[in-house]
Image (spheres, grey):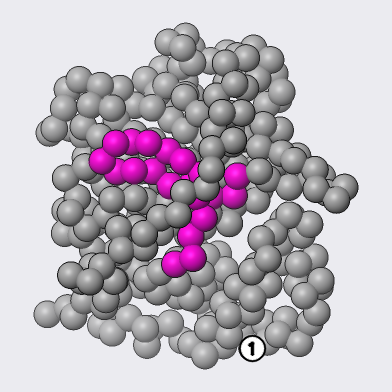
């Protein structure tokens, strides 16, 4: 089935501006969404999703109340939820493999819904991108919409705060209005947010993305476990070069949108590169070829789970 907007199939579009012209209520929904205050999420109930990751869970989850992601410039944050079961997924998409990623998200939500609820519908919320010079955001917006149109399930587009509807000019530079979102697992409420805590295993997960690995599901909701890896990368001492470069040089060459990155982008890049230099052989991080597992403690922290 095509992607549905107000219960009507979305016609083929060649530009996001065309989408918003045809469906003015999407503009209003986007304005309403981007004007909401940032929600400060308690890290003790949060599951954070990094770039090229997704996570899905249900309201029955006792370990996670909010799943969220931020630091999206040209990237898009995708929330898919089944209104009957409450099963919900969030993904941080950067355009690396959109056509193979979207079916994973649909499967994650439908598989958690199959034995719970026959009623309800799949609802899609898209946030991210801006009017960047290279049109990276625009291309990703169109690809994500087209990929969802190809799914066999009926999917209803609700919030669509993307590209030009998520754009603001500051000091002559375009940048996103909303960089991050959270979704309340219990209620399905989607809201703008930013996150100080991006764990567990923040550097390892960043290294996985930096070295080019594809979209991955990081969460086993049935056991309340975050699962990372095993990952593969080759030793690359050449990346040490970046640690001696200026912040402006790192921004220019390691970002898709140098003028729009959050203030911590350069430091994040440097810490990821240092991690890769300290761990040239990732096999040592995954004894016996097993993933790293993390579970939530009674205090609300994520701790490494010992595998038997």
**Residue at 61 percent of width and 28 percent of height:** 31
Q: Residue at x 17, y 22 (%)?
A: 118
Q: Quadrant of residue 160?
A: top right
In this rendering, the answer to whether 286 lies above or below 200 is: below
Give the image quarter of residue 200. Answer: bottom left
Q: Nearer the viewer, residue 209 or 59?
A: 59
Residue under label 1: 237
Residue 83 position, x and y percent, is: 28, 27
Q: Position of residue 271 (x, y in %)?
A: 58, 80
Quadrant containing the C terminus in the rendered view: bottom left
Which stretch did the figure color magenta? 178-197
Residue in the picture at 20% in, 20% down: 119
Q: Secondary structure at mark 1?
A: helix
Left or right of residue 170, residue 102 in this image: left
Is residue 191 a member of the stretch shown in magenta?
yes
- Residue lying farthest to the top in this orientation: 8
Q: Is residue 224 left or right of residue 218?
A: left
Inspect this view and state whether residue 207 appears. yes
Residue 293 appears in view? no
Q: Which residue lies at the image location 56% right of the left edge and 70% below the top edge?
A: 211
Q: What is the quadrant of residue 303 in the picture?
A: bottom left
Q: Quadrant of the N terminus?
A: top left
Q: Position of residue 139 (x, y in %)?
A: 68, 37
């Amino acid at each position: 089935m095509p992607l549905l907007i107000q219960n009507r199939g979305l016609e083929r579009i060649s530009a996001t501006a065309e989408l918003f012209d045809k469906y003015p209520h999407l503009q209003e929904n986007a304005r309403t969404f981007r004007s909401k205050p940032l929600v400060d999420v308690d890290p003790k109930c949060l599951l954070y999703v990094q770039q090229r990751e997704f996570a899905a869970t249900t309201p029955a989850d006792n370990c996670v109340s909010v799943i969220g992601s931020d630091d999206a410039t040209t990237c898009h944050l995708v929330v898919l939820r089944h209104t009957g079961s409450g099963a919900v997924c969030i993904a941080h998409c950067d355009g690396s493999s959109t056509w193979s990623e979207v079916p994973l998200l649909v499967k994650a939500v439908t598989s958690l819904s199959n034995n719970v609820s026959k009623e309800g519908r799949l609802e899609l919320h898209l946030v991210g991108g801006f009017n960047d010079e290279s049109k990276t955001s625009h291309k990703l917006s169109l690809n994500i919409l087209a990929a969802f149109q190809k799914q066999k399930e009926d999917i209803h587009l609700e919030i669509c705060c993307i590209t030009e509807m998520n754009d603001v000019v500051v000091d002559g530079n375009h940048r996103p209005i909303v960089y991050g979102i959270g979704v309340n697992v219990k209620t399905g409420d989607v809201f703008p947010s930013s996150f100080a805590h991006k764990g567990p295993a923040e550097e390892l997960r960043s290294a996985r993305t930096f070295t080019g690995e594809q979209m991955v599901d990081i969460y086993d909701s049935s056991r309340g476990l975050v699962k990372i890896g095993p990952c593969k990368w080759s030793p690359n001492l050449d990346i040490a070069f970046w640690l001696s470069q200026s912040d402006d040089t790192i921004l220019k060459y390691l970002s898709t949108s140098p003028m729009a990155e959050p203030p911590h982008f350069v430091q994040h890049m440097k810490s990821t590169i240092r991690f890769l230099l300290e761990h040239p052989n990732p096999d040592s991080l995954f004894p016996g070829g097993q993933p790293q597992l993390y579970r939530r403690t009674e205090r609300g922290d994520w701790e490494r789970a010992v595998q038997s």
